[in-house]
Amino acid sequence: MPLTLTGKTAIVTGAGSGIGRATALAFADRGANVLAVGRCQSKLAATAEGRPTIVPLAADVTDQASPTAVVEAALDAFGGINALVHGAGSIKHTPLGGISVDDFDRCMAVNLRAPLLLTQAALPPLARSGGTVINISASTGQRGWPEMSLYGASKAGLDFFTRTWAGELADHGIRVVSVAPGPIESPILDNNALDDHAVSAIHRLHELLPLSRLGTAQEVAWWIVNFAESLATYTTGVILPIDGGYSAV
């Protein structure tokens, strides 16, 4: 029997592009209602185009008022929350010796503080629904990655959140998992956070991967959506590498 999420509601941050957009679309295609959160209204509108169950919400997840506003928007639009996907991310390619306080604060605010505060704000509706928190970390956060200290450390911290919250929230009926993508074709490779050398290095990784290619956002989104399905309810506290075998070699 095909799995369905009809009548369920997912909040997806970072839904304007990349893995976040692919995840919002995948939830909608499975029948779910989606609150698509991101900073750029036009990108969110593109995500929602042709899918009436996606409601866009322009918000900066690092703003202090955002957690409450995002949760209230989901409850106002759909009446509940079944899945919370932390897809917003900040990446900074800077060698040790060149990292500024602003670099550190921005990366940690997006990659760690925002998921923490939004999850806290969403706990009551997630407990009512027996919901799922899905963190998007990175398999590269489990290994050394020169000149990516901030990004890797923040993603490793997010995995620690996953393990810890899985234990804390089990009695409330809330499951917590991480998907840990490896090298993925994504718009993040084209933005100013990475220089040409870093982008080239990521593209060359396909030579080292057992599957010999970069992954796609849709391949990551498939796992995220399936973690929210009813047949995944015996799974919590796991960190799933989706990386073409990168973490195994």
Image (cartoon, rainbow, N blue to C red):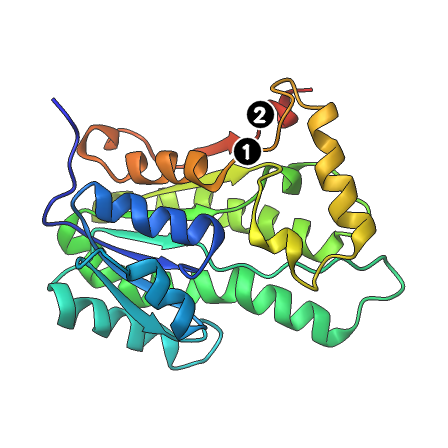
Q: Amino acid at mark 1?
A: Gly
Determine which of the numbered discs, if any, sits on residue 215 in the image.
1
Left or right: residue 47 compared with residue 7 = right
Q: Name the residue beneath numbered marker 2.
A: 244
Q: Secondary structure at mark 1?
A: loop
Q: Residue at x 47, y 66 (%)?
A: 114
In front: 145, or 131?
A: 145
In front: 93, or 126?
A: 93
- Of marks 1 and 2, the one in the foreground: 1
Q: Secondary structure at mark 2?
A: loop
Above or below, 158 relative to 113: above
Q: Amino acid at mark 2?
A: Gly
Determine which of the numbered discs, if any, sits on residue 107 in the image.
none
Q: Is the residue under label 2 in contact with that under label 1 (CB below 8 Å)?
A: yes
Give the quadrant of the C terminus: top right
In front: 63, or 163?
A: 63
Left or right: residue 123 compared with residue 105 = left
Q: Position of residue 243 (x, y in %)?
A: 57, 30
Q: Position of residue 12 (x, y in %)?
A: 35, 57
Image quadrant of residue 221? top left
- Residue furthest to the right: 97
Question: In this view of the protein, can residue 222 be seen by the observer?
Answer: yes
